[in-house]
Image (cartoon, rainbow, N blue to C red):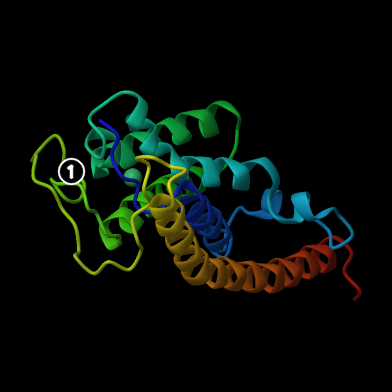
Amino acid sequence: MIAALMPSPIGHVLAGVAAAWTADLIPGDRDWRSAPATAGWYARAGGGFTVLCGALAAAPDLDLFFGGHRTITHSLAATAVVGLCAAAVAAATRRPIARIALTCALAYGTHLLLDLLGADPVPPEGIQLLWPFSRDWFISGWNVFEHTERRHPFSALSLGQNAKALVREIGILGPIAMMTWLVRVKALAGFSTELASRDHPTQ
Ligand SMILES: [Zn+2]
């Protein structure tokens, strides 16, 4: 069965990246997330960990390749497992465990949130948010995001629907990601100055 995606991977990646940048605003062990203003944009954007968060936010839809779309991978239980795995990797690599676990779970969790807010034309509508405790399907019905059409992807109808969905996703999530980026740039710049004055006190 070819099911609809709601929203597209592009929207999900944007949300995951915004989640990583938002988590960077939380004070604590985050010096490894900052880069000097002279560094390249990739380093300043948070490098590989930000990319990982974008990938995690799109990952639940990999279930399209295995069947059972919008079930196990779209649950709070799966989000918790992602957090636990991230914690284990953080512990093994001597990174801040709670921060990494929560950021990864947050990025993954944005996928569930966006799907809940999206339109779903394929019944049963929504996601099995509470799997394995309940097989009920959840959706807000608010249709904030349009569904993307994967059947006959090159037909005029599908191309039109997908373009419409993409414009809406980018229109909503683009400014959110941009805003988190700008706030983060300011916050981390202040943080770098703080670190520099701590390392080289003027008085
Ligand atoms: Zn999904």
Q: Is mark 1 within 8 Å of ligand 1?
A: no
Residue at which label 1 appears? 128
Residue beneath the point at 43% across and 46% down: 155
Q: For numbered disc 1, what is the local secondary structure?
A: loop
Residue beneath the point at 58% across and 69% down: 180
The amino acid at mark 1 is Gln
Corner quadrant of residue 190? bottom right
Residue count near mark 1 (Cα–Cα under 10 Å), binned few <14, some 14–19, many ≥20: many
On the image, the x and y values in percent for residue 136 come to 8, 45
On the image, the x and y values in percent for residue 198 come to 80, 65
Compared across the picture, whether 136 is left or right of 51 comes to left
On the image, the x and y values in percent for residue 149 come to 36, 48
- Residue extending farthest to the front is 156
**Most foreground residue, 171 or 25:** 171
Q: State the count of labels.
A: 1
Corner quadrant of residue 144? bottom left
> If the image is split into quadrants, where does the N terminus sit?
top left
Residue beneath the point at 56% across and 67% down: 174
Residue beneath the point at 16% across and 50% down: 125
Please tell me in which quarter of the rendered image ligand 1 is found: top left
